[in-house]
Amino acid sequence: MTTSILQRRGPVLPRALQGARQVGCVLLVILGGCSEGILGAGADEQDDCPGCECSDPSLLTESSCLDAGQSWSCESSQPSGDATCASEYFLDVGQYEGPGEGYPDPEVEVTCSKDTVTVVSNGIPHFPYEQTTPNPLAPQDWRWEFPRRPEVADVVTEIPLLGDAGVAVNGLPFYGPNEGAFPDPYGDPIFNQLADDCQGHTAGQGDYHFHALLVECLSSGALAGEPSPLLGYAFDGFPIYGPMGCLNECCSEVVEMKSSWVQVGDPETYAWDAYEFQERDDPQYLDQCNGRIGPDGSYRYHATADFPYIVACYRGTPTDGSGVNGAGGGPPGGGGTPPGDGGGEPGQGPPTCENESDCEGACPDGSLGCTCHERFDGARICVPTCERDEDCPEGALGQLICLEDVGICAPLTGGGL
């Protein structure tokens, strides 16, 4: 089978997806599904779409879908109705090339109960893998649950400072916009160029995760002038689309959605202190959590080119225990202090140093030793030393592990070490 690789070394597509026109369906809050080909080429689309008030019926094309008993949202011709299982929107990862020779094939299974979506994944990318951290890719035993019928909550909820905040449609988790405690304490990994071409990398246990979501890495692509496809789900159950979205019900105006967070400091360290949310009176700009209420009345997030890249907070209510590998959380409004993990007091990153003597007593109790370690940017910080995992103390983010190739301890979460 002949395949082609999308730009930025995205996924290799099966022939059935190459050049295929993407059906423009927008997922509603209730995750209404659709089936193609219900309307014939000669049908009166406006009459066959009850509840649609589009001024231009031609926007409802023969690629539209309609299930009995459902009403229409004119945006992207998507019907509303009972919640369709999210499995309809996940990739069939078995049809893709996978990470390359020597790695397991990717596996993803998605099931639904009345109120819950469950995703089980082995954590293996469906696209060619490029190692960008010292941590080799390894299969995982992921299982996540999130609401099938999400609702907007009265207050927003923090996402984890580190760890899983949601799952992409290929069964891989995504994190928020922070990196681990070492070597750049909780900095912005996209700004610091610590990710691969699909904006992900491996953490300490070889677990691959994204820090941003790209259309070209997670779908067959979107046609120019059309809204972006669904790329994943946050753990509050709301869908995440690519950057392009409709401004009206008929989707006659499609624009790039933009983050309302602006850079006010240095993102090399604790990212939430480096960006500030500034509300805009412009429908192109997203809310504090990097989402919006669409023209159909449903809430959705958008992956954006700028910080926070995916989600900044949960607009709904995440299921208890939905995410794994998570810890801490920056205030949804930005700012705040990260946990201290490695050296220094809680609420601070590892202390800086100029020589070894500066690190005497600077690391947590139980450390084998404490050394002045030079980061990628030339800054020097105090970190615990080790020869094996048992030498590493417990930090604010949980038990540290030994990076034996460099002889220092680091959190389980976060790559870019």
Image: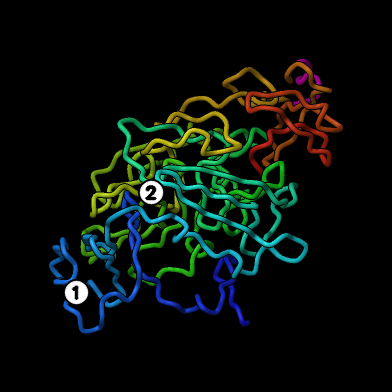
Q: Is residue 297 left or right of residue 202?
A: left
The kind of residue on which mark 1 rests is Glu
Instruction: Looking at the image, tell me whether mark 1 or mark 2 is earlier in sequence order.
Output: 1
Q: Is residue 275 left or right of residue 27?
A: right
Q: Which mark is residue 45?
A: 1
Q: Residue furthest right?
A: 387
Count of numbered marks = 2
Residue at image location 59% in from the left, 22% down from the top: 348
Residue at image location 37% in from the left, 38% down from the top: 316
Residue 387 coordinates in the image, percent (x, y): 86, 32
* Magenta span contains residue 358: yes
Secondary structure of residue under mark 2: strand
| Vertical placement of residue 284 versus 346, above or below | below
Identify residue for label 2.
Answer: 301
Residue 75 coordinates in the image, percent (x, y): 25, 62
User: Which of the pair 52/120 is nearer the observer?
Assistant: 120
Q: Quadrant of residue 203?
A: top right
Residue at image location 72% in from the left, 33% down from the top: 410
